[in-house]
Amino acid sequence: MSGAIEEITGRYVHVEIGGVDHRVYFEENGPEDGIPLLCQHTAGNNCQEWRNLLTDEEITDRFRVIAYDLPFHGKSVPPTTQRWWTEDYTLTADRFAETIVGIADALELDDPIYMGSSMGGNVVLELADWYPDRFRALIGLECAAHSPGFYIDWLDHPHVNTTEVNAYSCWGLMAPQSPEEARRETMYLYEQGATGVFKGDLYYYSVDHDYRDKLDQIDAERCPVYVVNGEYDYLTTPDDGRETAKGIGDGAVAVEMAKIGHFPMSENPELFNAYLGEILDDITGEREGELPDVIAPEDVGVELHPPAPVRKPEGGGE
Amino acid sequence: MTDMELASHEWWERYKETVNDDPEMRVRGHDEFDANFYVEIGDERFLIQMDRGRVRDVVPNPGLNHRWEFGVEGSREAWEEFVRETPPPFNHEIIASHYRSAVRGEDGHLVLTGDNKRIFQNLRPFQRALDLMRVAHNGGGS
């Protein structure tokens, strides 16, 4: 509708990370006194992945939703005091966790919920282990103790069209049931990443992050951990999620999201936001009963987009 | 559902038409896709000869006189799943399927073969060409 203005606001906050000032872009919507819900994008992407959560009134009526661009992503330009172009961008677990906590501190968020997907999902394990008192709860979407095999040299190679490849290497991470326009937008967002940043994030994702022998270090009774993986996520499957929650023990819950994949918030926002409502109700104590092992579209009253619409020939007709 | 058997002569004819009519294969540089690849379905191998984003020919049982840069191999069951209107996880896309085979060591999935560099240089049109097997099989879709 021409003239409609979305309620999202975008600003910049300065955050000291590794002793260096970083200018971090963030968008938010929701009441100032709402429970902060801090959202981390996936590897190589930016906060636009959360745009449909930021405009979902059912969520933003109660929660102050904040989504930021990690340094080097989206509108968070590299630090101007550093000669960053002389080295490969490489994200480590230490740096990633420090950055997230640094942003929460810089925004003075009181008892926030953290939520991230993919690398943002995996890092709930480090956050739970290293900063158990900083967050009210941690939601790891597409989260596992280990996610090997995606630190691939071709994702940053001069003979490869990495703009397109960094996107479409992720095409099959989404479920075929997700609406095509939303899957294509997710790819479009991927195509905006700077050279080498996706691969650099995947150093954390596939190399530095490995909690297979460390899950018992996490005390999820101090900070609840939700491991929420999509049925079509081939990198970190729902079974990987169950194993991760089991390894953590009390306080950790695994939920499988049916008919969705690795980018739930952007590949099928309507379905994901409905699923998320159940998780958030559990965190705030408004939900009766335990969360199910599998949550499906019919449980949240969402009708799926037809999975494979017949292409109509030009000029109409079947 | 299709009335044709996967990889029959008629099926490949329909596939060729589907690729050659596909609007996405005409844009975003995919009309430069020139790499020949093969598809191995059980014991049967088919060479897909590409010419500027179009299928020029499909050659059954290619031999010493033919050239290709990469290919995909899998059981007939895995391919039947791949071309289903709503394919099951994780045979719903080539990188997904290859990942479960190559990194996780699982059976029942498709495997990429050949020159990895050439695969990544041609990833999207190659992936689209494979996804169009599903479109051809079901008489439409995306």
Image (spheres, coloured by chain):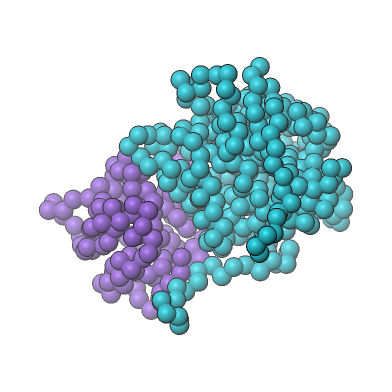
Chain colours: A cyan, B purple
The percent position of residue A126, horizontal first and vertical second, equals 68, 30
Write the residue at 66% across / 45% down.
A141
The percent position of residue A69, horizontal first and vertical second, equals 63, 37
- Farthest-out residue, front: A3
Q: Quadrant of residue A134?
A: top right
Q: Quadrant of residue A82?
A: top right
Write the residue at 34% across / 52% down.
B29
Position of residue A145 relative to residue A171, above or below, is above
Q: Quadrant of the N terminus of chain A?
A: bottom right
Q: Quadrant of the C terminus of chain A?
A: bottom left
The percent position of residue A194, horizontal first and vertical second, equals 49, 36
Is residue A2 visible in the rendered image? The answer is yes
Decide if residue B103 is on the left or right side of residue B40: right
- Farthest-out residue, bottom: A317
Is residue B75 visible in the rendered image? The answer is no
The percent position of residue A81, horizontal first and vertical second, equals 58, 18
Q: Nearer the viewer, residue B2 or A159?
A: A159
- Farthest-out residue, top: A19
Write the residue at 42% across / 53% down.
B94
Position of residue A112 relative to residue A177, above or below, is above
Write the residue at 59% across / 68% down.
A305
Q: Nearer the viewer, residue B48 or B109?
A: B48
Q: Quadrant of residue A223?
A: top right
Decide if residue A67 is on the left or right side of residue B54: right
